[in-house]
Amino acid sequence: MFRRTHFIAAIVAAISGTALYAATPAEKVAERQESFKSLGRANKAIRDELAKPSPDFVVINNNARNMHITARRIGWLFGRDTGPQPGVKTGALPIIWTRFSDFRAKHIQFTNAARNLESAASSNNAGNVRTALAALGATCKSCHDVYRKPD
Ligand code: ASC
């Protein structure tokens, strides 16, 4: 009985702790923005390698892998409560949430292109990486053109 009480107390503490630490919309948007920045850094790191006479494929593979992981994760960072609102600065346009099935389809194209980049990187062939990176960039742009506030 003693142990059971403690067990229940632990569960209650865990649940209320989770509620206390649930991310606010501003925190979720900050994580989203950091994820996009990380994609931009990895994209640049790969392009910088490709510009060299003998690209370092360890760098390319690591960055391609990170892009694939981040691309997948970013799809979970567009909750309904993460659009423009007082106290939250975001370039995400409200139409994301009125055309969510199209937005989701674009996210799938993006993650597929990121997966292709990771597999191109593992071929250790600069031409393959260049082609896959261009295709990935096109999926970034096709979403940004519609769903991101113009600069
Ligand atoms: C980036 C970035 C984008 C995309 C896009 C690719 O690094 O910030 O918006 O790549 O330029 O076409």
Image: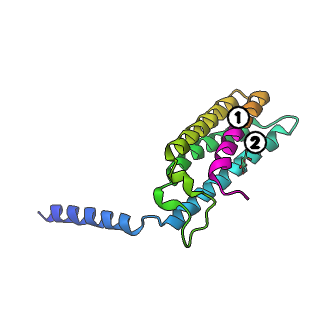
Asked whether residue 3 appears in the rendered view, the answer is: yes
Q: Identify the main secondary structure in magenta.
A: helix
**Where on the picture, by quarter, is residue 106?**
top right
Disc marking residue 44: none
**Where on the picture, by quarter, is residue 128?**
top right
Q: Is ligand 1 closer than 8 angstroms to the Cβ of mark 2?
A: no
Percent position of residue 35, x then y: 61, 54
Three-letter amino acid code at disc 1?
Ala
Percent position of residue 124, x then y: 73, 29
The residue range painted magenta reads 135-151
- Which residue is found at the position 85% from the left and 39% from the top? 51
**Where on the picture, by quarter, is residue 91?**
bottom right
Three-letter amino acid code at disc 2?
Ile
* Residue that carries the numbered disc 1 in the rendered image: 135
Percent position of residue 139, x then y: 66, 40
* Residue that carries the numbered disc 2 in the rendered image: 46
Q: Nearer the viewer, residue 105 or 48?
A: 105
Q: Is residue 67 left or right of residue 86?
A: right
Asked whether residue 58 appears in the rendered view, the answer is: no
Q: Is ligand 1 closer than 8 angstroms to the Cβ of mark 1?
A: no
**Mark 2 Cα shell of 10 Å, populated few (<14), some (14-19), many (≥20):** many
Q: Secondary structure at mark 1?
A: helix
- Which residue is found at the position 77% from the left and 33% from the top? 130
Q: Nearer the viewer, mark 2 or mark 1?
A: 1
The image quadrant where one finds the C terminus is bottom right
